[in-house]
Amino acid sequence: EFENFYVTSKKLNNSTSLEDVLSVFSEKAKEIIDYDYSLFIFSDEEKKINQIRGCQGVDKHLLGVEFPHDPDKNLISWVIKNKTPLDYSNLKENQNVRIFDDSIGFPYEFYSCFIVPFQVAGRSLGCSVFLSLANDGFSINAKKMIETTANQAAGSIQNINVFKELEKMATIDGLTGLYNHRTFQENIVLFLNRAQRRPENISLVILDLDHFKSINDNFGHTMGDTILRSL
């Protein structure tokens, strides 16, 4: 079993996208617990929005669906906020449990549920939701193993997010959100070479703002920055 976890950990560490991580995680989860449906949900707590970014066994139309991050109204948000796994059994007898936000309208029947957060360094990125048609679908040992794997997956997701942020900082101008000078020089060479290989035109637009210095001098650099961003 230790060797299997090592192999999974290695696959997660080698993943270069969120989709890769979720694929490895769901594959390992299926070996551990016999779930019927799963969803992988990530949260933006500042915007108070959750989004379904992956799923297994359910219609793909749920991918990308957003719903409110409201811990008082659905258990998914509660788990993300409190960074605490939660499981329910025999849901057929307890119709008042709100796993999903009412806006989702989850179309499948299920009788047990296990929600485990993706957490790393004390921060919750989202959660995975496993649903089963069995009344008591998930054993204690299986849930412990899923928690361990979810934490490994969260670490990989965090590494991917950090890499993307560093890549953005290296290529994007922080003020305007446009490509910086170095990236522009690299891309213009690529576009010119491509235009030479294919029968297509290429255009370059250059803007020169007249008297822009007077805006900075008279109204301050903060106002100048605002005008640049608006362009």
Image (cartoon, rainbow, N blue to C red):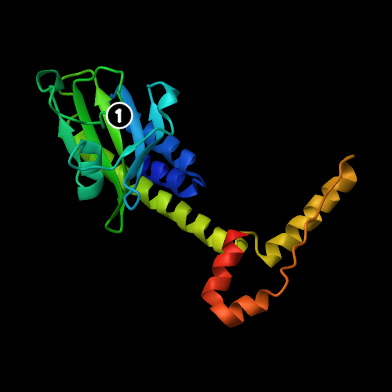
Task: Judge by depth and name the residue closer to the eye, 182 or 23.
Answer: 182
The residue singled out by tag 1 in the image is 103
- Looking at the image, which residue is at 19% across and 46% down? 84
Identify the residue at image location x=40%, y=27%: 62
Query: Could you tell me how many numbered marks the image carries?
Result: 1
Expressed as whole percent of the image width and height from the top left, the position of residue 55 reads 39, 29
Q: Quadrant of the N terminus?
A: top left
Residue 110 % position (x, y): 23, 20
Q: Quadrant of residue 28?
A: top left
In which quadrant of the rendered view does residue 121 lie?
A: bottom left
Q: Is residue 170 left or right of residue 100?
A: right
Residue 196 versus residue 182 in the image, above or below: above
Give x and y (percent) for residue 12. Answer: 43, 45
What percent of the width, then of the height, locates residue 87?
17, 34
**At 14% across and 26% down in the image, what residue appears?**
89
Q: Residue furthest left?
A: 93
Using the rendered view, name the quadrant where residue 201 is placed: top right
**Hey, what amino acid is under mark 1?**
Ser
- The 10 Å Cα crowd at callout 1, few under 14, some 14 to 19, many 20 or more, is few
